[in-house]
Image (tube, rainbow, N blue to C red):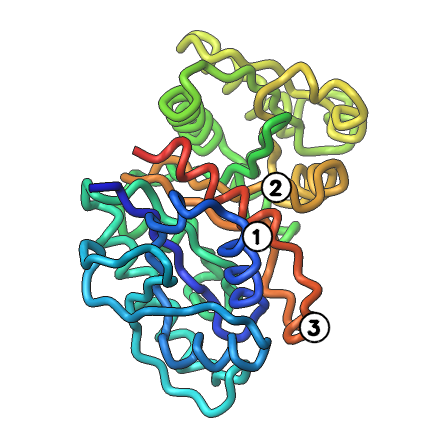
Amino acid sequence: MQKKIILLSGDPNSINSELIYKSWIKIPKSIQKKIILISNFRLLEKQFKKLKYPVRINKIKNINEYDSGKNLKILDIDLQFIKPFQVDQKSASKFVKESLNLAHKLAQNKMVKGIINCAIDKSLLQKNKTGVTEYLASKCNVKKNTEVMMISNPLLNVVPLTTHLDIKDVSKKIDKTTIFNKVLSLDKCFKKIFKKRPKIGILGLNPHNAELRLNSEEKKVIIPTILKLRKKGIRIKGPLISDTVFINDYKNYDVIVGMYHDQVLSPFKTLFKFNAINLTLGLKYLRVSPDHGTATNLIGKNKANPLSLLKCINFINKFGR
């Protein structure tokens, strides 16, 4: 029996149903047979109808239930709604959390290659501003600072050491233990997935690395941690200067590690746009998501780009175990 790919429809107030349809009709039947979608059957049916998408969906009770492969298979999660793209915050939050919980449970089954969640508004998981990475890390009981968010492209990967923090709080979270544990986890998981040890470039925190002043984070925290990581055999260089590394030097590395979210994601998205996926390292299973948000401004306009979701599906199909 083929191992399954678990796909979550994610935020019900989004472009996700459009992306699911556009991806579904582009993937070969051999992959369609592996896809199990966690969603609400009635909502998805109404969203497809509103978008005028002629896709057949089939409600199933478990992932091993037989299906010819012609229909998109749905594991149904309860959801109360009035209009197809107007689900209230409380209901949407409950739906998203139940979907993630079910996916987490299924992902530990040896019959699952990995999970993909479509975009989710972080306000639906609003506990200390956590995102899906932190939510699933908590479910997996992983050690602190060993979960890693990596935005991945065949030409480059980037990792922000802190994710959804306000800039004023970043320096408080940059310490030797965080950097050390995150980079160790990155190295271990990258090797497990891609079968090679990565060349890692790590950025400084401040403009021009604060000219390496004695009281700077670069001197006090980042450089000592780099030296310690090298002693562990990690192939790491830095601190690199963030305002120039993405001009050309990034090509010398498999992964660029930054101190905060936009330090690495803004230049990465400028370079690669939708040709990327969001990959969580350090979990007990493989989890990816498209590298974009819910795009509520595009709902119903049939303009959403499915490239990132297609990349996710192909990634799980290739690397999932």
The three-letter amino acid code for the residue at tag 1 is Leu
Which tag is nearer the camera, tag 2 or tag 3? 3
The three-letter amino acid code for the residue at tag 2 is Tyr
Residue 301 is tagged as 3
Which secondary structure, mark 2? loop
The quadrant the C terminus occupies is top left
Q: CA distance from mark 1 to mark 3?
A: 32 Å
Residue 260 is tagged as 2
Badge 3, how many Cα within 10 Å: few under 14, some, many 20+? few
Q: In this rendering, would 49 be left or right of 108? A: right
Instruction: Name the residue: 38% across, 43% down.
Output: 30
Which secondary structure, mark 1? loop
Residue annotated with mark 1: 165
Observer able to see residue 136: no
Q: Marks 2 and 1: in contact by CB < 8 Å?
A: yes
Say which label, 1 or 2, has the lower sequence index: 1
Which tag is nearer the camera, tag 1 or tag 3? 3
Instruction: Name the residue: 43% across, 8% down.
Output: 233
Instruction: Name the residue: 39% across, 55% down.
Output: 7
| Relative image position of residue 286 (x, y in whole percent) | 36, 40
| Relative image position of residue 97 (x, y in whole percent) | 35, 67
